[in-house]
Image (cartoon, grey):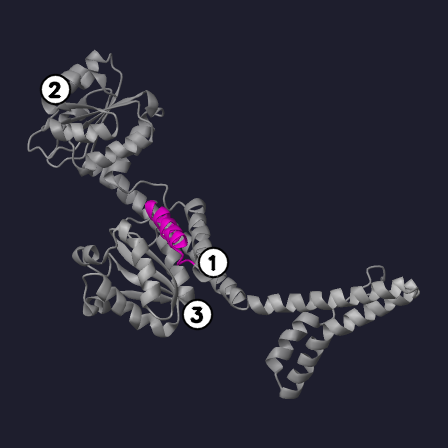
Amino acid sequence: MSILAYGLNYRTASMELRERIAFPEDDVTDALRQVKRDVDGVTEAAIISTCNRTELYCALHPDAEPELTRWLAQYRPVSHHELNDSTYKHWDQEAARHQIRVAAGLDSQVLGEPQIMGQVKSAYEIARQTGTLGPELNLLSQIILRAAKEVRTQTEIGRNPVSVAYAAVSLAQQIFTDLKSKRALLLGAGETIGLVADHLHSQGIGKMAIANRTLANAEILAAKYEAQAMQLTDVAERLPEFDIVIASTGSSLPIVGKGAVEAAIKARRRRPIFMVDIAVPRDIEPEVDELPDVYLYSIDDLSQIIEGNIEQRREAAATAETYVHEGARLFLRESRVQKHRDLLKNFREQAKDIQAQELERARKDLAGGTDPQRVLERLSNSLTNKLIHTPTMAIRDASADGRTDLLDYLATLFAPETKTDDNNPDDGH
């Protein structure tokens, strides 16, 4: 039985193809059951499906791989030809290496992004609940998640923001160490402002308000965070209330002018305002940066920060490959051990049976009045002879058959240790 990581991602397939092949969350359980049922040779399966990748992780007979491709072409609205042109396949140790890189964010479109590790963990948990996770994938999941966690904790791969929204909030944290006591005003209600609101909320911002040209859109976003909604026309009047202003409206003209900010600073008695203008064209007049007690950052400022952070993540990614390599090596080793676990189990059980038989014989001898010293000697000799009988015969057969590889290995196990007499001053010279 082999392990296969089979799928496509943002590097190998267009967004349109990724959308067609993606598995909706509610569909994953049924798909897992069907792939195990319909593809001969597949004994275990897990599926991870995100906006950037869809991958099937399977324990299967290698000959079953073409059948897996045919099944996927039938199950999703995608042709066999499209799959052949866009998919990749990683087997066994390389499958483990690939999955560690995926779970650690090393294979993500945004290098080091943290969400993917939870998505991989969830994929295996769904497989467990569905009944398609067996010993092979269970071992794999444990090793890849452990290795990915080491990458996240032992390197700087995810500790520097590389998105505009996250970088804006990180800058706010540098200026205001305690966001719980601060108020934030967000201008706009689009995707970027939504991400900013999410980050601020997760960092425990004290109060948040969202201003938008269309009040209904501001109200929809504000409701998610128990924030206040207002129209852009109210911003100048309300500006003194806020410590943080982050803007991304898509307006063709500035929303916040120098005069409004100057009046706000005066009303705040020179308490600072942190402002980030993510919009192009700008939402905040650039002259605002001339005012004292105002910290204004533009999209270009954030881009410089993000580029520096991306470079730091690239350096961390190089270090992380050590953990990827070690995790893949550990999986190969442990999977080999697991494949021969029945041999180890039988070996131990055979030894325990011999022990039990000899112990019972010794007890009977003692009960019959045999001298205890003789009983112990016979127990020791008989136990030793029976335990070494099978290995002894194996060594003899290997010698007769010229199995030097096996004999060399056994020699490393049973070669007598070199002993030295620490009390003897004569070292041979």
Q: Earlier in the sequence, mark 2 or mark 1?
A: 1
Q: Amino acid at mark 1?
A: Leu
Q: Which residues are magenta?
A: 115-133
Height in image: 363 above or below 392? above
**Residue 392, visible in the rendered structure:** yes
Q: Which mark is residue 1?
A: 3
Q: Earlier in the sequence, mark 2 or mark 3?
A: 3
Q: Which residue in the protein does label 1 denote?
A: 139
For the point 74% across and 65% down, the residue is 355
Q: Amino acid at mark 3?
A: Met
Quadrant in which the N terminus is drawn: bottom left
Q: Residues within 10 Å of mark 2 (few under 14, many from 20)?
A: few
Height in image: 273 above or below 303? above
User: From the viewer's perspective, is 311 left or right of 231?
Assistant: right
For the point 33% across and 30% down, the residue is 203
Image location (x, y in percent) of residue 39: 32, 68
For the point 27% across and 39% down, the residue is 305
The prevailing secondary structure element of the residues shown in magenta is helix
Distance CA(mark 3)–CA(mark 1): 14 Å
User: From the viewer's perspective, is 333 left or right of 267?
Assistant: right
Q: Amino acid at mark 2?
A: Asp
Camera-near label (2 vs 1) is: 1
Q: Which residue in the protein does label 2 denote?
A: 234
> For the residue labelled by badge 3, is the local secondary structure a helix, a strand or a loop?
loop
